[in-house]
Image (cartoon, rainbow, N blue to C red):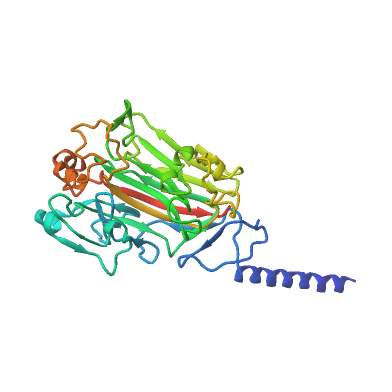
Amino acid sequence: MLEFIKVLIVFLINLTICLTIYAVAYKINPYCQKSITTAGGTAIPNKRGYCSGELIFEENFDRLNLNIWQHQITLNREFQWYTNNRSNTYSKNGKLHIRPTLTADIYGEEFLSSGTVDLRPDCTDWANDGCLRTGNTKNIINPVQSGRIRTINSFYYKYGRIEVSAKMPAGDWLFPAVWLMPKENLYGGWPMSGEIDLVESRGNRIFKVGGKNIGTNQVGITLHFGPDRSHDAWRTSHFEQNLPYGQGYDQKFHKYEMIWTPDYIQFKLDDKEIGLVETSDGFYKRGKFPNGTVNIWENGEKNAPFDREFYVIINLAIGGTSFFSDSGSNPGGKPWKNKSPYAITEFWNGRNQWLPTWDLYNNKNENPELQVDYVRVYAL
């Protein structure tokens, strides 16, 4: 009997060792609670599934990894020219920096009104003459260069918890954003397939609308969705958070977080909830669209269009005709009107107002830069 017990103990020990080796080799966690999170892309290993709480994507920006972050290269419909240039996007001290520069400093000011920019074959967005453009005195070439990077091929996911530590820039008419877009436009073009804005801000230290400062002391979080461009129901899923004047989001790093589930999308700022969107009734009902509007999401899941995999985008936009209201007040005024056909030229002609607020030529000044410390995504 004693001998049998000894043999049994040896057998159990060997069995435990074998199971442990197998679990390590195939990454099996005996305590794993299966997650509903799905993910794909070249930056993550092929796996059949994830454990709840598992870290599935992490970027600490020890270097700017171009295998993960694809630069968008285009003349955007705002006032910036998105480049793949280390003057605009780079890693420093373990942080991503996106910094604006002036096109005229590279090509000369005359180029803005007479030069031709041909971004082919590397151009990533043909919309609004984004790949080929010739400047003239009324509509100049985009006068500011900046950066916009994305994980469209390297990482995309559905459901999970994303955390981003970021410091917003300061400087008039800067518009930074960290956001997510669908890997595939299953329901159609924007905003039909959705957009998730994890954080947006304005670089003006003082920009008042209706007497309220919505500059660097405010950040916004938004879901965009709608059956067409004229019916974007973003106001039903928009949240803002303000700090006292002088304590803006450009002063230090803050943590922006989204918990995305089939039943709700929760937004947090520095671990405090600032917005909750319940999805049980569907986004068609939430949008309160006009009678006769077709429910383009009726064949999707209950939370469509936010039932597909999304990828991450980080960018620094400048100006444009959507982000800064003409009714707003700013020291020195706003140099352009949103409905002006020559808004981009008016913006450039007013550079004596905004360029000093950037302090761009002080190489030690990081105020006009969007900085990101890390991006982390966890399985539900």
Relative side of 313 to 22, left or right: left
| Residue 194 spot, x, y in % from top left | 47, 51
Up-down relation of residue 347 to residue 128 (above or below): above
Up-down relation of residue 222 to residue 214 (above or below): below
Residue at x 27%, y 35% (from the top left corner): 326
Asked if residue 223 can be seen in this view, the reply is: yes
Nearer to me, 338 or 257: 338
Nearer to me, 281 or 258: 281
Residue at x 61%, y 56% (from the top left corner): 36
> Number of marks in the image?
0
- Residue lying farthest top? 211
Asked if residue 253 can be seen in this view, the reply is: no
Relative side of 355 to 243, left or right: left
| Residue 127 spot, x, y in % from top left | 32, 58
| Screen quadrant of the N terminus | bottom right
Which quarter of the picture shows residue 222?
top left
Relative side of 68 to 98, left or right: right
| Residue 35 spot, x, y in % from top left | 62, 56
Up-down relation of residue 19 to residue 270 (above or below): below
| Residue 244 spot, x, y in % from top left | 35, 29
- Residue lying farthest right? 1
